[in-house]
Each structure stands twice: as structure tokens, then as C-alpha cells.
Amino acid sequence: MARTKVFDQQVVLDKAMNLFWQNGYNATSAQDLVDGLGISRSSLYDTYGDKHSLFILALKQYRKERIDPVFEQAEVVEDVEAYIRNVFEIVKADAISPEHNKGCLMVNSAVELAPFDSEVAIIANSIMEDSENAVCKAIERGQNSGVFTTKHSPRALARFIFNSLNGLRVTMKFDASKAVFDDIVTVCLSALKA
């Protein structure tokens, strides 16, 4: 008879996501996972498979919790300029918070693993494409309402903004000063203005 699991799989997945986010994939050992998740090695493997499978689940969880809600708002916001500013503010708030200055799990993972791990590359590319599309739609609405410049296509501006957001996420890992972020956000937003 199989033993009943005595742990909440979602709670354990959230803990794993945070361990990978804090340490990166390669620096998180199986023993780190056992210690950090508070479950036995056999429970870890029986429930989640190997370390890589757990990591993939953690990336998907990160997207669901932290990325998708932000970009889903692009479809419904009225004030697209405030929306774009708010996306930058979310990144900045994470950067200057001692609790969250780990960067972005997805960006960290793409840099660490995507060149060598096709599954991570597919997830990262999917997130980046969906995020770029959401920003593109918001910018197009801003262009149609006369708030944003039409000097460049919505796609080109979305790529510029999304690249700037990713750059901020990398920068925050070594310089989380508020002044740096305020300068970058101000210049990025001014590039959008009509």
C-alpha cells in the first residue's frame, strides 16, 4: 500500500522556486532541496521526479505567480502610460527590497541555462514572447490614443521596453540603487512619449 503524502505539494513547490531563485539551478544541490523543502529525498523524487523536473515546475510556477498577472493587465488597463510605468515600478520595487533583490528567476535561468538546456530555452522564449506581445498591445493602444510616439512601430518600442526591463533585472543583482532605476525608467518612458 502506498504511503499518503503528508506535505502540501504547492507549498513545497513554492519553497523550491525560492531556493532556485536565490541560488540558481547549478548551485542548488539535491541535498539543499531536501534540507530546504523539509521532505525526504525519496519524497522529493517520488513527487517531483529529478532536480531538473522540479526546476521546470518551479519556472512554470514563477510564471504563473509573478509574470502572467502583470502582463494580463495589459489587455484591460485604461491608462497605458501608467501601466508601463507600473511595470517598471514593480521591477524597481523588487530591486530595492532586501527580500527580493535576487533578480528575476526567469531572466536568471535564461542566462544560466537557456544556451545549454532546450526545455528552459523554450519556457524562457515563450515568456519573453508573451510578455513582449502584451507590452506591444499596450503601446499600440497608447499610439492610437496619441499618448505614445508613432515614430517607431509598436513592436520595436515593445522590444525596447522589454529589453530595458530585462536589463534592469540584471542590473539589480549588483546595483539596486534607487537613483539608477529612476534614471533608466525616466529615459525609457520619455522614449515612448509622442
Image (cartoon, grey):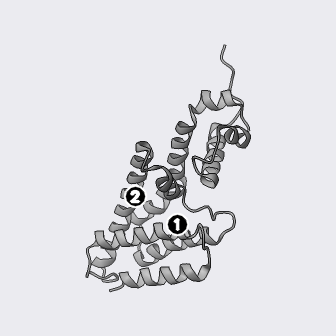
Query: Where is residue 77, by image quadrant?
Result: bottom left
Give the vertical position of 26 relative to 162 (above or below): above
- The secondary element bearing badge 1 is classed as helix
Query: Tag 2: Cα neighbours inside 10 Å, few (<14), some, or many (≥20)?
Result: some
Name the amino acid type tagged 2: Met
Query: Tag 1: Cα neighbours inside 10 Å, few (<14), some, or many (≥20)?
Result: some
Query: Where is residue 6, by image quadrant?
Result: top right
Nearest the eye: 161 or 25: 25
* Quadrant location, the C terminus: bottom left
- The secondary element bearing badge 2 is classed as helix
Query: Where is residue 189, by image quadrant?
Result: bottom left
The tag on residue 128 is 2
Give the vertical position of 182 relative to 154 (above or below): below
Q: At 65% across and 49% down in the image, what residue appears?
A: 19
Question: Image check: 164 left or right of 98?
Answer: left
Q: At 57% across and 72% down in the image, what residue appears?
A: 92
Give coordinates of residue 11: x percent, y percent: 66, 43
Mark 2 in CB contact with mark 1 (< 8 angstroms) = no
Q: Depth-wise, is mark 2 or mark 1 nearer the camera?
A: 1
Task: Decide which of tag 2 and tag 1 comes sooner along the chain.
Answer: 2
Q: Alpha-carbon distance for marks 2 and 1?
A: 15 Å
Give coordinates of residue 127: x percent, y percent: 42, 54
Name the amino acid type tagged 1: Val
Question: Image check: 76 left or right of 140?
Answer: right
Which residue is the site of mark 1?
170
